[in-house]
Amino acid sequence: MNDLPPDVSRLRVLETWLQITLARVREQIAVAEQRAAQQEQVLPPPPPDWVVQLSVGGDGKPVAVHVGGCRSAGRRARSVSRDQVMRALAEGVEACALCRPDTELGIF
């Protein structure tokens, strides 16, 4: 069972229509791929594992330790290593009451 027209002229019209449609689909694919690539570039980097919140004054002393991504860390925070967090907690720097980095580290 053949559902295509039998004559050459109508087959040529159909061929032209299919070529135009294929070109439009390929253009739309290119646009979608560009959009996806741009969205991948916009994604922020993952938060650090640990952050130290610094004081407001010019000295910038640590005032609290947070798990990375804790919203209460504020703008004056910098990422630190696990060893630096352990040292800060041992030196008496306060652990955040919300994210509980001391519990996360196994220090009660």
Image (spheres, grey):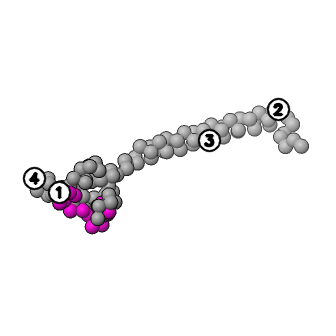
Q: What stretch is highlighted in magenta?
A: 89-103
Q: In this view, does 38 lie above or below 105?
A: above
In this picture, residue 61 sits left or right of residue 43: left
Q: Which of 31 and 5 is in front in this view?
A: 31
The reply to whether the magenta stretch includes residue 95 is yes
Q: Which label sits in the foreground, 1 or 3?
A: 1
- Indicate the secondary structure of the residue bearing disc 2: helix
| Residue at the image point whose x is 40% and y is 46% from the top | 42
Residues at marks 1 and 2 touching, judged by CB atoms closer than 8 Å: no
In this picture, residue 45 sits left or right of residue 20: left
Q: Earlier in the sequence, mark 3 or mark 4?
A: 3
| Residue at the image point whose x is 10% and y is 52% from the top | 59
Q: Disc 2 marks which amino acid?
A: Val
Badge number at residue 8: 2
| Residue at the image point whose x is 77% and y is 33% from the top | 12
Q: Which of marks 1 and 2 is nearer the N terminus?
A: 2
- Indicate the secondary structure of the residue bearing disc 3: helix
Q: Disc 1 marks which amino acid?
A: Glu
Q: Which label sits in the foreground, 4 or 1?
A: 1
Q: Earlier in the sequence, mark 1 or mark 3?
A: 3
- Tell me if residue 71 can be seen: no
- Tell me if residue 57 can be seen: yes
Per the image, the residue denoted by label 1 is 91
Question: Where residue 45 sits: x, y (%)?
Answer: 37, 47
Q: Mark 1, residues whose alpha carbon is within 10 Å: few (<14), some, or many (≥20)?
A: few
In this picture, residue 18 sits left or right of residue 10: left
Per the image, the residue denoted by label 4 is 58
Per the image, the residue denoted by label 3 is 25
